[in-house]
Image (cartoon, helix red, strand yellow):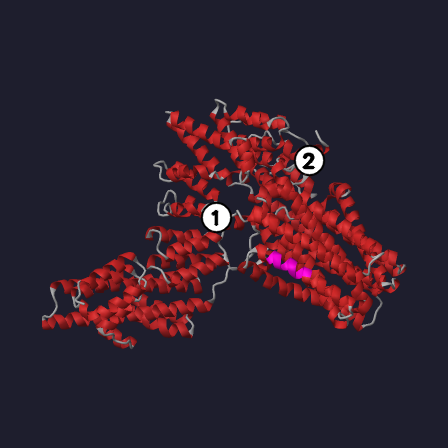
Amino acid sequence: MSFKKTLKHHVLKVFDIKEEELKKTLLLQLNIFILITTLLIVKPTINSLFLSELSSDALPLAYVFTAVLAIIGSYFYDKALEKFQLNIIIDKTLIGSIISLIVFGIGFNFNLITGFLLYIPYVWVAIFGLLTASQFWILANLVYNVREAKRVFGFIGAGAIAGGIFGGYLTSVLTTFMNSQNLLFVAALLLILCIAITRYIWRTEVEKLNPFQVSIRSNPKSDSPFKLIKHSKLLSLIALVIGLSALIAKLVDYQYSDYAFRLIDDQDDLTSFFGFWLSTLSVISLLIQLFLTKRIVGTFGVGKSLLWLPSGILIGSILLLVIPQLWVVVFIKIIDGSLKQSVNKSATELLSIPIPIDIKKKTKTFTDVVVDSIATGIAGFILIFFINGLDLSSTYISIIIIALILVWLTLIYYLRQEYIIAFKNLLDLSQTKKTKLVKQDIKVTSIIDSVIRVFNSGTENQIINMLTKTLEVKDERFFYGIKNILHHTSPRVKTLAIDNLYYLKTENLSTEIEEMVHDRNQNVTTSAFRYLLKHYQKNKVELFEKYINSDDYTISNAALLGLSLELRNNPILQYKFSLEQKIDNALSKYSNLTDEALKKEIISVILESIGNAKLSTYYFIINTQLQANDIDIVRVAIRSASKTLNSEFITPIITHLSVKDTRPCAINALYAYGEPVIDVLFDKIINETIDFEDAIYTVLAIEKFKSQKAINTLMLLINDTEHAVKIEAIEALKRLKWKYPNLKIKDDYIVHQILDECQLYQNTLAVIHTQIVLQYKKKATATETKEENEARIGLIHVLEQRLDRQLQRIFRFLGIKYPPQDVDPILNTIMNGKEEQRVHAVEFLDNILNSQLKKELIPVAESVILTSNSEEKIKKLNLKVFSEAECYHELLKRKDVKLKFAVLYLIEKSNPLKYKVLLETVLTQETNAKLIANIKNILSLLPN
């Protein structure tokens, strides 16, 4: 074996990378390496140029500018992400950065960037580092699915560490024969490579993804991260601790920059100094992470490990007050820079175990960007007041740092206490009603010990809950605790234990887990096969051939499922393992069986495997089984269709919404497509390309997203849909409004809708009055045929139904603005209550409504309880009386197919020639095919 192949083999084995992933993984690693190298060249260069010109006195204001622009910039950046594709934004960011670096380089060389203008490059470099790193990881998340990301992100992240080490040392070397300002041109050249790599990765890996896959792989957008943090005491304390550490880090950075500026006169030497120590910090941080972090956290526990960083800075700050020397400031900087990214980061991640993964994802950006930016701004204001305002030496910043560290230590104490409470709540939540009676009290001490104690002595539900959480953390210290429960009596525990061990490397358990493929539970055997596909050290193809051809259907089915899950989105491995051939064999086996129970089991596995592996060749099987008579098979087909994330299955899934037995499964399947499906569902409802009955329940699928986008879409559905869809959309809005207060529904919108419905109600009442008057007049003059009379009676009947519907909508809208328990019973009382009850109901409305609603809604409510005829109601409401032509024009504008048919039928049976122009106008605006055909038929009977 050649050296190249040997090296490749070792890299794949050591870093847990699959051969077909190696090229894109190395390219992404190179990309982040170049980005961080560039940052480590630019940052010390611009810092030294800034300090040499403006001195350290200018730093506080620079911190404030950085914070303000970072927060404002993040808002507009989020808007840009919604409008443009990520690759365009990355491309423009890199091109803009290259142009900026060239402009800065020219500006510095010709002394064009001086004085206040120096704030521009200083702030730019801070935002550049934040923006490019963020973009890189968003791109990486698109390239890999969740399972792949867990395996390879550590290896890719090593590129960032290497860039942090290489960039600073390169800067130190380059300054020996190059002016500082010319380093910016070197950085610009490096970024050109990033453009080429990013474009190649996007073209080969991301372009093949559909919008649904992109949505699933992207970090979920947070509707209100601030409120999520506010409502969780543990998250609030974590955010405060992160913010306080960022604030102290900025104050330390100021001392570090100030001492360096005052003691190093030469600009190039200052650049070299910053570059050298930035890289040295990365080296020390890496060494601590590799050799000390696990020992420190394992020995002292997470709570005490959090004390290392503030304690180290505290000792350094006290020392600086006694010995105000540069080496002391460098020591403090080393403590801050190295421990923050190693011991402190590891401990903080473990502390967040009780927090649900979706909430962690939604709040991560907020804590990383917004909290850090706010801390930077506060640091700037502190420095402006104490250093610039009181003209103090930077040494005395240590007094402020010491005071803040005391607050920090106090917060860590409360954070640990809150963690213990959250951990115990997590264990309580994992209890069922039955197990609560025999609940075991598990003592919560250090985090690692507490988790392992749950594995050793917790109830089944506690263990399941904890295994779900440790799956998010992927920490080798849990290995033996998880290994010990591999043979638990619960299949769910065994499945989750194997899923956890899949990511851990302490030992290879292939031999032990291979025995578990004989387990009678298919979920256990499927997970076992996934583990073997990753960790088995001999011939994996032969291993799977043996088990897939087994006479035991539990084993052969599990082997096929495990294979399909592990080979998802990987055509190279699918070909290597002959996955399509194995599906063909399973189909042959299925057609030859006579046992219905076995046939059902095998077709279910085939469907799941097709969905898991996204085998488009066999999508016709999913389509066929979506029409099966067996509801269980239909449910499996629906789930498999959603796993493909293929848009061709959206409509077939929708057709199962109107069937009660398949509705929950169909809603979950549509939800699995991610938020982009909301737009697809909206278009299908609005354009009436799905059955009316299915459209009603499609609203429930939109509601399930519980997001602001869902709210906005439901509001659009209310404006231009049939009554039943409107009612369901209003009800969905009501449920979301009162269950999820963080979602916004503007009061003005609800008031506007209620007023519109009141106007519609009054118009309908006026139209009914007109039709009754016409009926009476024509009867008196004997000018109305029997057919016309029947058509008019039919229209009046439909209009009376619409009055009831409009009242329903009015009061359901009220249930969004006011508590539903107060408003919901009122309509029934007004419609069906005794006279006294009806009067009281109207009085109650009069008390709770604002003046705007009261003016329109109270007359409507009073008109309902009037026993007088329509003419008296018209006079009381002071309504406009429509002519016959105005009636038809008003009704044909509405989004109500049944009502339009009733109007057209009346026109046809009365005097269609009189309304020829109206019919021709409606024909140009109508979208419903049946109505268009009806109008054309009427017009065809008229003379030209």
Can you tell which mark lies on residue 508?
none
- Residue highlighted by disc 2: 8
Tell me if 482 is positioned left or right of 675 in this view.
right
Q: Secondary structure at mark 1?
A: loop
Task: Kindly identify the residue that appears in the image at 59 percent across and 26 percent down.
Answer: 514
Whole-angstrom CA distance, mark 1 to mark 2, is 37 Å
**Looking at the picture, does residue 391 appear above or below residue 133?**
below
- Disc 2 is placed on an element classified as helix
Mark 1: few/some/many CA within 10 Å (<14, 14-19, 20+): many
Q: Main secondary structure of the magenta part?
A: helix
Q: Is residue 707 placed above or below 528 in the rendered structure?
A: below
* Residue ID for mark 1: 673
Picture coordinates of residue 254, whole percent (x, y): 79, 62
Q: Position of residue 854 (x, y in %)?
A: 38, 73
| The N terminus sits in image quarter | top right
Specify whether residue 96 is painted magenta.
yes
Q: Foreground: 89 or 893?
A: 89
Q: Amino acid at mark 2?
A: Lys
Residue 460 seen in the current view: yes
In the image, which residues are magenta?
89-98
